[in-house]
Amino acid sequence: ETGVTQSPTHLIKTRGQQVTLRCSSQSGHNTVSWYQQALGQGPQFIFQYYREEENGRGNFPPRFSGLQFPNYSSELNVNALELDDSALYLCASSLGQGEHQPQHFGDGTRLSIL
Amino acid sequence: GQQLNQSPQSMFIQEGEDVSMNCTSSSIFNTWLWYKQEPGEGPVLLIALYKAGELTSNGRLTAQFGITRKDSFLNISASIPSDVGIYFCAGQPVTGGGNKLTFGTGTQLKVEL
């Protein structure tokens, strides 16, 4: 139990729709990172938020966007959903963004696009 | 996106056997981590390595940070049924990476009773 909670656990959407996923970080953790995990693959880094500012982005298009709130919780928004967006979306929190701050993951949101 | 190369991709072992898996990269990493993921759950941190050559243990698990900073291995001794799952290595890049992670392709471990 990492203390990182994500909602919803499962979600079904259709192509072209928009979706918002939510994450509550572990108590005291001010850094949240989002990852996309396709079936049979390792997680891929989407972006990271540190103290409400985006702090690095992976190779994902602008229709993937996010927010971090003053309580350090975070949202991932995806617009114009495509079939390839079907994946497990993982949130991870850490005590800072430094190299010696390991990330702890939630159990993810399983997003299915029809 | 980039993924680290893990081998083997999957393995069946007998309960009580020792297990070894490794992870390689074409790039240098500052930190190596090993995670385990079970069905329906997120990855759980097993071991973190912060220095080239470092050897760290966590119970029956031992991991090493390669001297070249381009590889790492994980050993599990005396495997038990609850070791079943997918093991991922993850590295933190050297340049401007902070603690953002690049993951491996995973090693699926199955234990025969």
Image (cartoon, coloured by chain):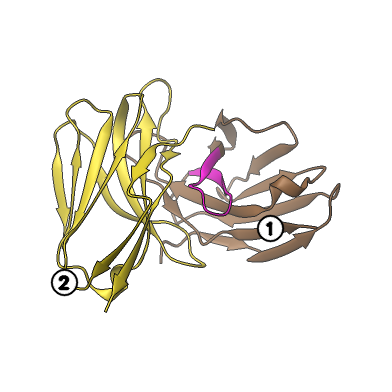
Chain colours: A brown, B yellow
Any magenta on residue A35?
yes
How far across and down, in percent of the image, does residue A46 sit? Answer: 58, 38
Q: Quadrant of residue A7?
A: bottom right
Determine which residue is flagged by label 1. A111
**B11 or A25, which lies in front?**
B11
Q: Which label is found at residue A39?
A: none
- The residue that appears at 63% across and 53% down in the rendered structure is A87
Question: Is B95 on the left-hand or right-hand side of A65?
Answer: left
Callouts 2 and 1 in the same chain? no
Question: Farthest top residue?
Answer: B95
Residue sitting at 26 percent across and 34 percent down? B71
Q: Type of residue at label 2?
A: Gly
Between label 2 and label 1, give the one nearer the viewer.
Answer: 2
Quarter of the picture holding the C terminus of chain B: bottom left
Task: Output the chain of dot 2.
Answer: B
User: Mark 2 near mark 1, Cβ–Cβ under 8 Å?
Assistant: no
Assign a secondary structure to mark 1.
strand
Q: Dot 1 falls on which chain?
A: A
Q: Nearer the viewer, residue B7 or A31?
A: B7
Q: Residue at x 14, y 33 (%)?
A: B53
Q: Position of residue A25 (x, y in %)?
A: 51, 54
- Residue B16, disc: 2
Instruction: Count residues near mark 1 (Cα–Cα under 10 Å), then give few for <14, some for 14-19, many for 20+.
Output: some
Residue at 79% over, 46% down: A81
Q: Which residues are magenta?
A: A31-45
Quick one: label 2, few (<14), some, or many (20+) residues within 10 Å?
some
Decide: is B97 above or below A73.
Answer: above
